[in-house]
């Protein structure tokens, strides 16, 4: 998939209207639920980090985490999308952009190392399905205008 950061408003609206079911919902409900739990864990860590930093109160963070803040941000982004029941192209773009950082990190490994292959497969399947639907809708729109 090619990253698309700047797209026209009408194309953006059309792409956002296209959704695919998150393959983890049907194929692997326990992993889908675990992604939501991991999202909450990572989000709490990120929020505590920001509070400690913003308020200049390091004790709010508790024991200093040994994760890089960018690793935590990446995991929050990835687990947030993985825990949604439906995905748009924007969701897949977020996964494409953040998953390499998240997958390399220790935090992701602690949360979902054994599921990494199943997660990648779900993302690939969703990308293919969304591409198929986008192509079909574009063809239908083109034929309708003739």
Image (spheres, helix red, strand yellow):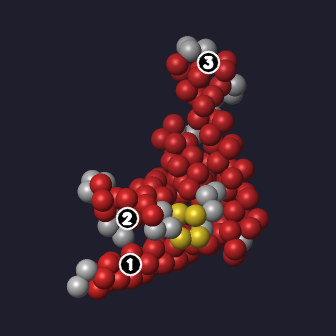
Q: Percent position (x, y) of residue 51?
A: 59, 22
- Reading the chain from its start, which is encountered first: label 2 or label 3? 2
Disc 2 from disc 1: Cα separation: 9 Å
Q: Position of residue 18 (x, y in %)?
A: 46, 68
Q: Is residue 127 visible?
A: yes
**On screen, 130 above or below 88?**
below
For label 1, the residue is 137
Which residue lies most toward the top here? 56
The residue singled out by tag 2 in the image is 14
**Within-10-Å neighbours for mark 3: few <14, some 14–19, many 20+:** some
Residue 92: x and y in percent read 46, 62
Residue under pointer 3: 58
Circle 1 SS class: helix
Left or right of residue 37: residue 54: left
Q: At 38% across and 78% down in the image, what residue appears? A: 137
Q: Are marks 2 and 1 in contact (CB under 8 Å)?
A: yes
Residue 54 drawn above or below residue 140: above
Q: Where is residue 28 drawn, in percent x and y?
A: 71, 71
């Amino acid at each position: 998939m090619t990253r698309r950061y700047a797209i026209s408003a009408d194309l953006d609206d059309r792409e956002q209207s296209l959704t695919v079911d998150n393959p983890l919902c049907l194929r692997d409900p326990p992993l889908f639920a675990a992604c939501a739990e991991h999202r909450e864990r990572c989000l709490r860590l990120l929020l505590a980090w920001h509070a400690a930093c913003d308020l200049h109160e390091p004790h709010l963070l508790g024991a200093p985490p040994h994760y890089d803040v960018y690793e935590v941000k990446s995991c929050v982004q990835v687990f947030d999308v993985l825990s949604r029941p439906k995905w748009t192209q924007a969701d897949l773009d977020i996964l494409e952009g953040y998953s390499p950082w998240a997958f390399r990190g220790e935090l992701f490994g602690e949360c979902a190392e054994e599921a990494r292959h199943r997660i990648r497969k779900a993302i690939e399947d969703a990308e293919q399905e969304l591409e198929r639907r986008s192509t079909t809708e574009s063809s239908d729109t083109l034929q309708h205008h003739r």
